[in-house]
Image (cartoon, rainbow, N blue to C red):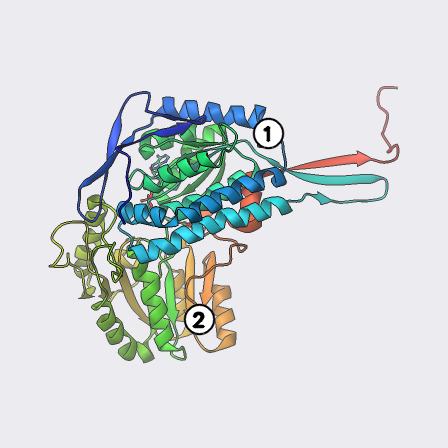
Amino acid sequence: MNHVVSPLLQHFIGGTWQDSVSGDTFADVNPATGAVITHVAAGDARDVARAVAAAAEAFHEGPWARRGGAYRAPFLERIAQLMRAHAEELSWLETLDTGIPIRQTRGQIARAAENFRFFAARAREMTGATYPVPGFLNYSLRQPVGVAGLITPWNTPLMLESWKLAPCLAAGDPLVLKPAEWSPLTADRLAHLIAEAELPVGVFNLVHGYGETAGASLVAHPGVRLISFTGETSTGRTIMQNGANTLKRFSMELGGKSPVLVFDDADLERALDAALFGMFTLNGERCTAGSRLLVQDTVADRLVPELVRRVGRIRVGDPFDETTDLGPLIHPEHWERVMSYVALAPQEGARVAVGGRRPPHLPAGSYLEATVLTGVTPGMRVAREEIFGPVLAVMTFTDEAEAVALANEVDYGLAAYVWTSDVTRAHRVAEALEAGMVWVNSPNVRDLRTPFGGSKMSGMGREGGEWSFDFYTEWKSVQVALNPADIPRLGL
Ligand code: NAD
């Protein structure tokens, strides 16, 4: 079923829908066809200033920050309910906007709703801490920090937005969301659902626009205390520089080039299933994609030809087709960037073993075949840089030490996947890998309570469960003397 997209997406500021002060808009484009879907208000510093003022008023004057988690939880539950009730529409919009196959966006939307439900429960359970000692009562309170700026990317947009919005709201911080300019549809729809949930005015604000204008203004605004950012490492670096003057608190979820280590004692079939799923779902635009497959040389002759055969059978096509595995990339500019790496591979000495072309049956749209590069060596750019598309680099290793060294070679350290049936090696390798998250004999599944985030150039800080609350709340420590404590007397 087709749903309606409004011809102009506006900002949501202080409880009202608003055009940009400048009146400017930008076009939102369907990645499968190149057709314009709708136009979107292009915010700048003036729109951001209005939104921050609304959020600041909600923080200082309204009930949101002052009252506890038990007050806020029902609002989050209501948002989760509304998302579930509109799940089909939300996945339709997400597929239309991002080109992610509809079968996959359904899972993403369910997970996004679950984030609100999860953090509603956590809000109710939020506690402080006490440190009693004789003669003193010391305790610590978790308190909201202030106005938060949430800046999100275009890959799985609604899921990643929910990941920030839910804990931020649960913790009591009013916020301004700046979604990615290439994927504004579900943020707009979510804002309508949040409006329906009747949060106090100014608690949730949405400003659309480009990163360099709307995003940068949010980062520079002195009234914003925290910035939670997900996106490219280079953007994260710029944001931290621009936020330094106002000494903001940052959470940075950045890029990755995550390794999949397959040892010769692994269940090769399951390892292959997981490697294909982790790399070629979400159109290869997944931050935790296992984009470097490291195979022990003793099984490479068995594994790699089978990998190439199966990648050649991945169905590329219309993301609304229920049988599609891989849809179009988000935008023609991104298609060009991914293709530049495919072109670079043979120049660096690697081989395009399968894929690497626009599928002949799809002349329009940002489509690219699922692609495998073999003969990759660690110094190559295709082995080190994040391509963020359906392009898998394959390398081989001879022993465990080399596997770990290869895995840790790159600047990134987001996720890693280990396949082995040797239980001691599994733990040893997990310990040695420079990554924020390691999965052993497992695809990428994560309990919402566990810390999510990357090491090295993949990020700073952790989100998820308590870690989200650590970011979105301030600890305040209070010391109370129960007896007259000794006070050295000066100036008598
Ligand atoms: P991006 O960095 O280009 O943009 C992300 C957001 O930042 C967008 O909303 C953009 O408008 C905004 N932005 C851009 N310049 C800005 C500036 N100067 N000031 C403030 N905001 C600015 O990233 P993208 O291309 O949208 O997303 C893909 C990247 O995100 C990949 O590198 C991917 O690995 C990463 N990612 C990381 C995670 C994670 O959890 N670690 C999750 C998803 C995506």
- How far across and how far down the image is residue 334, in percent? 23, 47
**Residue 391 relative to residue 70: left or right:** left
In front: 121, or 226? 121
- Residue marked by disc 2: 441
Residue type at numbered disc 2: Asn
Mark number for residue 309? Answer: none
Please name the residue shown 22% across and 52% down the image.
328
Q: Quadrant of residue 134?
A: top right
Residue type at numbered disc 1: Pro
In front: 438, or 156? 156
* Circle 1 Cα neighbour tier, 10 Å, few/some/many (<14 / 14–19 / ≥20): some
Q: Is residue 406 visible?
A: no
Please name the residue shown 38% across and 69% down the image.
261
Question: Which label lies toward us, 1 or 2?
Answer: 1
- Find out whether the residues at labels 1 and 2 contact each other: C-beta distance under 8 Å: no
In front: 77, or 181? 77
